[in-house]
């Protein structure tokens, strides 16, 4: 399903939700209260601005007595989406953010990856896949990164563990290009990056990817990711705790200036190893 037709399908989902809600004589606030989301969320579902998670679609079916139509519709759209199910909703929300604060303990975040680095990551996870599949996945990752090039790009603040700089993903040449790419974005003042050095020792969120997303007219959300799994959470207490963990990481990290220096030094080391200096 192409992007346009998928969006049209979500718009139909929203229009049908509005029709069924009004048939049940419920306001957006009333339906939201019964399915445990805000009335504003229901409005965004109806306008196809945000997509409900599966459990919300199931509760909507239960409240509106729609015989599972919204769950079936959700499963059909998710099945045909281009991202893994556990990440698809987070990928959609990235486009709507006003700010993204990301913690990367092991690899460069997808929004900052170069094609060569992304290709090495996908090949490591899918060694028997076809070239066509790998290139499709790389293309999707590069497409996501376009939000950082838009005039309305979100504020993007990234914390990298020093591990990210030292593991030679794809080899020395790839790493030199990747770190050079990050340094270039930093020097142009389009993103904020800090490095958490090895010397920090124990820290919050050890080994866990974390992305905090803020929006103009919706509550903030936190996305965490494990092995072939992800959690998108907007419970205020959870988001607050995650923000506190991020703040602790940020306080322990090197300054942006010192971080740029260590990233550029690592890039230079890789260039020497690759014999490209």
Image (cartoon, helix red, strand yellow):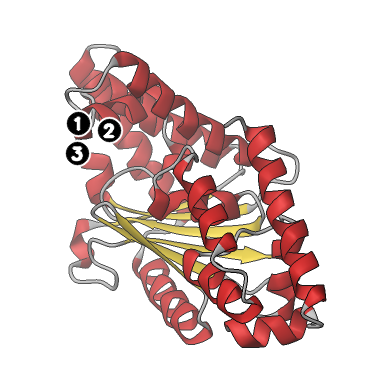
Depth check: 146 or 191 in front?
A: 146
Mark nearer the N terminus (2 vs 3): 2
Mark 2 or 3: the one toward you: 2
Residue 40 in percent (x, y) is at 74, 75
Horizontal arrangement in the rendering, residue 109 relative to residue 175 (left or right)? right
Residue under numbered circle 2? 121
Mark 2 burial class by Cα count in 10 Å: few <14, some 14-19, many 20+: some
Mark 1 or 3: the one toward you: 1
Whole-angstrom CA distance, mark 2 to mark 3, is 12 Å
At a point 23% along the width and 19% down the height, the residue shown is 272
Image: 247 above or below 95: below
Residue 30 in percent (x, y) is at 73, 87
Residue under numbered circle 3? 167
Mark 3 burial class by Cα count in 10 Å: few <14, some 14-19, many 20+: few
Residue under numbered circle 1? 124
At a point 61% along the width and 41% down the height, the residue shown is 148
Look at the numbered disc 3 and give the secondary structure of its residue.
loop
Mark nearer the N terminus (1 vs 3): 1
Mark 1 burial class by Cα count in 10 Å: few <14, some 14-19, many 20+: few
Horizontal arrangement in the rendering, residue 252 relative to residue 273 (left or right)? right
Look at the numbered disc 1 and give the secondary structure of its residue.
helix
Image: 33 above or below 165: below
Q: Are marks 1 and 2 in contact (CB under 8 Å)?
A: yes
Image: 108 above or below 238: above
Image: 174 above or below 32: above
At a point 28% along the width and 35% down the height, the residue shown is 266
Look at the numbered disc 2 and give the secondary structure of its residue.
helix
Horizontal arrangement in the rendering, residue 252 relative to residue 4 (left or right)? left
Whole-angstrom CA distance, mark 1 to mark 3, is 13 Å
Depth check: 230 or 97 in front?
A: 230
Residue 182 in percent (x, y) is at 45, 37
């Amino acid at each position: 399903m192409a992007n346009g037709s998928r969006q049209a399908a979500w718009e139909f989902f929203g229009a049908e939700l509005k029709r069924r809600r009004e048939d049940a004589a419920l306001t957006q606030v009333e339906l939201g209260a019964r399915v445990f989301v805000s009335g504003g969320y229901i409005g965004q579902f109806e306008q196809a601005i945000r997509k409900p998670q599966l459990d919300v679609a199931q509760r909507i079916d239960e409240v509106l007595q729609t015989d599972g139509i919204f769950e079936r519709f959700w499963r059909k759209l998710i099945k045909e989406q281009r991202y893994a199910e556990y990440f698809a909703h987070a990928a959609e929300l990235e486009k709507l953010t006003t700010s993204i604060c990301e913690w990367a303990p092991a690899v460069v975040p997808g929004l900052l990856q170069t094609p060569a680095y992304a290709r090495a990551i996908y090949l490591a996870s899918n060694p028997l896949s076809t070239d066509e599949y790998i290139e499709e996945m790389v293309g999707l990752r590069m497409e996501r990164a376009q939000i950082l090039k838009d005039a309305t790009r979100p504020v993007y603040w990234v914390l990298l563990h020093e591990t990210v700089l030292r593991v030679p993903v794809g080899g020395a040449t790839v790493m030199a290009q990747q770190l050079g790419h990050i340094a270039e974005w930093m020097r142009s003042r389009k993103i904020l990056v800090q490095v958490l050095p090895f010397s920090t020792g124990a820290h919050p969120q050890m080994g866990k990817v974390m992305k905090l997303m803020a929006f103009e007219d919706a509550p903030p959300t936190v996305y965490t990711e494990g092995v072939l799994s992800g959690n998108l959470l907007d419970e205020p207490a959870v988001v607050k705790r995650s923000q506190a963990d991020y703040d602790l990481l940020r306080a322990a990290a090197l300054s942006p200036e010192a971080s740029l220096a260590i990233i550029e030094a690592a890039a230079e080391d890789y260039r020497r190893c690759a014999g490209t200096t």
